[in-house]
Image: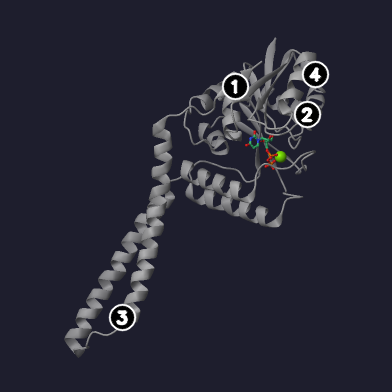
Amino acid sequence: MKLLSAVVPCYNEEGNITDFYVEFIKNESFFKRKDVELELWYIDDGSKDGSVGEIKSLIEKDKRVHLLSFSRNFGKEAAIYAGLEVAKGDYVVFLDADLQDPPALLPEMFGYLEQGYDSVATRRVNRKGEPMVRSFFARMFYRIMKKISRTEIVDGARDYRLMTRQVVEALLSLKEYNRFTKGMFGWVGFETKWLEFDNIERKKGETKWSFWKLFIYSLEGITSFSTAPLAFAAFMGVLFCIVAFGLIIFTIVRKALFGDPTSGWPSLVCIISLISGVQLFCLGIVGQYLAKTYMEVKNRPIYLVKEEI
Ligand code: UDP
Ligand code: MG
């Protein structure tokens, strides 16, 4: 008998917990035929609503349901990492609690593992029902990432993934504090099958990702998987040195040939303010990496557990 663990990060999802369970357990007979048992881990990411109560009442009815509750909100990435640690299955799958990752797709995904793939990933082919501005910036992010990172990060990729124990162990071996799972999946490699589906809107409750939170998350993605911004800062430095050198020669030659009296503080002010702007910007980039390094060096735990059932 093999075991499949489903890991579901939940943050204020009281309305979705039972609905999710019902949808998920519909796969029971399929997996029974395959000699695979199921377990379901709800990772409560410090919910402030009745999510934990909902999960506990499910646990009373079904022993295959488990709960890991954080001491506060640590973010979805932390919840995914915790799920990797607690899930005991030979196969592990991540799903969102809001049913945007349809559990009905699991049998098809499992089929690919049987064919020999190490992991089965999903991407949505459109962003139907999402605000236009958000889609636009999301597309931009993936386009930039493609250019500046050697790790493959797929546009529209969801965290809905089914993988073998081997891939789980690989992901667990990445112990970094600044986690950007979408990139880590690409980084660890392995044979991955991509499935596509249309975007499904969230069933109940609201999205936990504000535009600002997503923006910060995208910076996380860039700094975690690329050092291109640092190279850019260095490039700006070299560029301005060359320009400055040219200007010096120009000024000397002009003075020697035409005896031009020194005039032009307007141009001086422009140059100084432009260059100090660029300098501060580049300093900011360096600061971003420094901050990330600082957080890594502190070596704090990625999450803290309040309760495990
Ligand atoms: N989530 C979480 N911690 C957070 C934010 C979200 O565990 O700090 C969970 C959330 O409960 C859901 C999943 O991550 O199961 C995806 O979140 P959401 O649906 O809000 O994101 P969206 O689908 O809008 O990108
Ligand atoms: Mg969602």
What secondary structure is marked by label 4?
helix
Which amino acid is tagged 1? Answer: Lys
User: How many C-alpha atoms fall within 10 Å of the one at disc 3: few (<14), some, or many (≥20)?
Assistant: few
- Going by the image, does 257 lie left or right of 234? left
Q: Are marks 4 and 3 in contact (CB under 8 Å)?
A: no
Give the mark, 1 or 4, whose residue is nearer the N terminus. Answer: 4
Nearer mark to the viewer, of 1 and 2 = 1
Nearer mark to the viewer, of 3 and 1 = 1
Give the mark, 4 or 3, whose residue is nearer the N terminus. Answer: 4
> What is the CA distance from the residue labelled 2 to the residue labelled 4?
14 Å
**191 and 162: which one is in front?**
162
User: How many C-alpha atoms fall within 10 Å of the one at disc 2: few (<14), some, or many (≥20)?
Assistant: many
User: How many C-alpha atoms fall within 10 Å of the one at disc 1: few (<14), some, or many (≥20)?
Assistant: few
What secondary structure is marked by label 3?
helix
Residue marked by disc 2: 20
> What is the CA distance from the residue labelled 1 to the residue labelled 2?
23 Å
Expressed as whole percent of the image width and height from the top left, the position of residue 293 reads 40, 39
Which amino acid is tagged 2? Answer: Phe
Residue marked by disc 4: 28
> What is the CA distance from the residue labelled 1 to the residue labelled 4?
30 Å
Give the mark, 2 or 4, whose residue is nearer the N terminus. Answer: 2
Q: Which mark is residue 265?
A: 3
Nearer mark to the viewer, of 4 and 3 = 3
Nearer mark to the viewer, of 2 and 4 = 2
Residue marked by disc 1: 306
What secondary structure is marked by label 1?
strand
> What is the CA distance from the residue labelled 3 to the residue labelled 2?
68 Å
Q: Residue at x 74, y 42 (%)?
A: 206
What secondary structure is marked by label 2?
helix
The CB of the residue at mark 1 lies under 8 Å from ligand 1: no
